[in-house]
Image (spheres, rainbow, N blue to C red):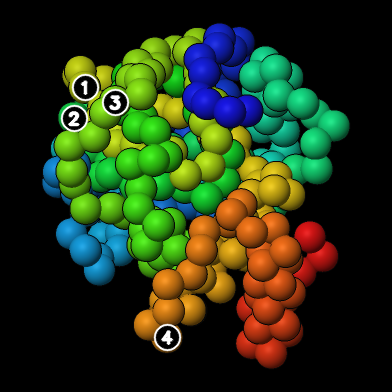
Amino acid sequence: MDAPYAFKHELDPDLFALDRLDALFRRAPEGMAGVQLADESKERPSGTGPRMTELQGPLADDLINRPLHAWFLDLTDWGPEYAPSREHILDASGIDRAQRMLHETTVIRLFSPGALVGLHGDGETQINCGLAGRNLWHVFPPSSISQQENEALMRGGQFLSWREMPLFESYDLHAGDAFAAPPRWPHWIEHPGPEIAVSFEVGYWLVPDVLDRKVWEVNWLLRKARLAPRPPGENPKLDRRKQRVFDAISVATRKGGEYRDV
């Protein structure tokens, strides 16, 4: 996938009805479902993380009464009824299923009417599907992110400072609409209209994206040392050296072990 593209899906809407999602929230394992306050603008303030809160009453009522973002993580690990939805989306998207797909995630998100998600980038490929309300994604080309922002993307820098950029395309996801996006295409999201917005997402890493991530993260360390590192792709031999450095650091710190075999 070289650029985002739209497609249609046929997910079962009953699986994503608000009363069913309320029951799903109540039975979710610890850490697998949560609620946070929605962003207040197109830019999340620098250095701030999600503003977590507790559910107050039924899920649908709370989403109407407060500007919220509710989420369910890694659904296929504990909600087996959603595994066919994942398979359907991967098939409907037309992606090459022969690719090695790493660290897959399946997520349901709900947003209050009018809620925003500030400008940010993701390191993985994402497939996003509308189920209810409107999920309006504004997507910009990866050239909109600086080298330094790419280095920091997985180091707490996922949310970006707002700036005017050339729009690639806006994807207005109603029920039945979907789109897929490669890694590191910045975007912000709005949820216009009077209805609670519901979406289903599948995310995954491909091997080239993991290898690039290793280079970006080593570059982040080099820049901390006041050096001027070269981005991935400019010097393949140097990239391989940085990838080995990442793996060595991972062994020493016992972090990032899930990427060492790539």
* Residue 215 to residue 233: above or below: below
Dot 2 or dot 4, earlier in sequence: 2
Dot 1 or dot 3, earlier in sequence: 3
Residue at the disc numbered 4: 225
Res 192 quadrant in image: top left
Residue at the disc numbered 1: 192
Dot 3 or dot 4, earlier in sequence: 3
Of residues 68 and 99, the one nearer the viewer is 99
Q: From the viewer's perspective, tell me whether residue 37 is left or right of residue 182.
A: left
> Distance from label 3 to label 4 (Cα)?
34 Å
Indicate the quadrant containing the N terminus: top left, top right, bottom left or bottom right. Answer: top right
Res 22 quadrant in image: top left
Q: From the viewer's perspective, tell me whether residue 203 is left or right of residue 134.
A: right
Q: Mark 2 and mark 1 in contact? Answer it, CB < 8 Å.
A: yes
Res 109 quadrant in image: top left
Q: Amino acid at mark 2?
A: Gly
User: Residue at image x 79%, y 60%?
Assistant: 262
Residue at the disc numbered 3: 167
In this rendering, the label closer to the viewer, 4 or 1: 4
* Residue 20 to residue 79: above or below: above
Q: From the viewer's perspective, tell me whether residue 99 is left or right of residue 76.
A: right
In this rendering, the label closer to the viewer, 2 or 4: 4
Q: Amino acid at mark 4?
A: Ala
Q: Amino acid at mark 1?
A: Pro
Dot 2 or dot 3, earlier in sequence: 2
> Distance from label 2 to label 4 (Cα)?
43 Å
Q: Secondary structure at mark 1?
A: loop
Residue at the disc numbered 2: 114
Instruction: State the image coordinates of residue 165 (x, y, percent, origin top left).
Output: 24, 34
> Distance from label 4 to label 1 (Cα)?
44 Å
Q: Is residue 62 visible?
A: no
